[in-house]
Image (cartoon, rainbow, N blue to C red):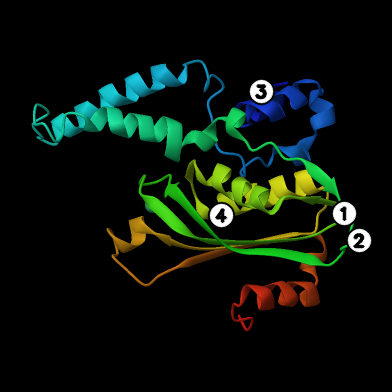
Amino acid sequence: MKQKEILLNTLLKEDKVLLQKLSADEIGDEHLSTGFETPMRKNAFELSNDEKVKKISHHFAEIMETLGLDMKDDSLKGTPLRVAKMYVNEIFSGLDPSNKPKIALFENKYQYNQMLVEKDITFYSNCEHHFVPIFGKAHLAYISTGKVIGLSKLNRIVQYFSKRPQVQERLTIQIARELQKVLKTDSVAVLMDAKHLCVSSRGIQDNNAATVTSFYGGKFQEENTRQEFLKYVGMKTDY
Ligand SMILES: [Zn+2]
């Protein structure tokens, strides 16, 4: 029972509803690796968005004040509220499962059972260790098993998971798992190539470093399929 409680604490609302119907035995040990879920508190949605904005605004004003800024200055006094609204309604809106894109599947009328690649999707996220931007390109692919989704939905899935405090590895896996779930196939590839401002604008200050993360599921685990995907994406394949 304890195991089940630990597990429930680490899951998103919708997955929790599913899991609560299962006994601890049914969940089993192998489901305990939930490192790919964004760590959220159980009561993450007790406060309304308006209450969250108010609270964050208050605390952000404290941070600015502590730094020695004059909060009566015309240019600064609106900043705490602006930051709070940006956090809740924009750059961290992907923490709220109710903002998850609704995906409609279509029959694959063309019997197109080849690889579909959607490349160069621009994304903006934030590093959960420093709260500064991570941004770059995502390249996705899947091999249809009879169902297809609108191309813009692929983009929306990337944006939804990006709008959270993230680490790039988890972001990549969250996008891949969501694609596998909605497309009802394991054959999904996700490649993300990004710049981390916590590396380039502070700390080690390396302006050229980029981070590449990948996920290859189903047929993409086969070398030929993977090479075909990488060829379309236009990356060097000899690494
Ligand atoms: Zn960082």
| Among numbered discs 3 and 1, the one appearing first in the sequence | 3
Separation of disc 2 and disc 4 at Cα?
A: 33 Å
Task: Label 3, secondary structure: give it.
Answer: helix
Residue drawn where x is 29% and y is 64% of the image: 204
222 up-or-down from 143: above or below: below
| Among numbered discs 2 and 4, the one appearing first in the sequence | 2
Q: Amino acid at mark 4?
A: Glu
Residue holding disc 2: 111
**Is 49 left, or right, of 174 in this rendering?**
left
Residue drawn where x is 69% and y is 54% of the image: 151
User: For the N terminus, which image quadrant?
Assistant: top right
Separation of disc 3 and disc 1 at Cα?
A: 41 Å
**Res. 213 image quadrant:** bottom right
Residue holding disc 4: 169
Separation of disc 1 and disc 2 at Cα?
A: 6 Å
Q: Whole-percent x and y of residue 224?
A: 79, 77
| Among numbered discs 3 and 2, the one appearing first in the sequence | 3
Residue drawn where x is 43% and y is 44% of the image: 128
**Is 218 left, or right, of 65 in this rendering?**
right
Label at residue 91: none
Task: Label 4, secondary structure: give it.
Answer: helix
Separation of disc 1 and disc 4 at Cα?
A: 31 Å
**Pointers 1 and 4 in contact (C-beta within 8 Å):** no
Residue holding disc 3: 5
Task: Label 2, secondary structure: give it.
Answer: loop
**Pointers 1 and 2 in contact (C-beta within 8 Å):** yes
Label at residue 108: 1
Q: Give the number of the mark in front: 3 or 1.
A: 1
The 10 Å Cα crowd at callout 4, few under 14, some 14 to 19, many 20 or more, is some
Q: Amino acid at mark 3?
A: Glu
In front: 70, or 15?
70
Q: Give the number of the mark in front: 3 or 4.
A: 4
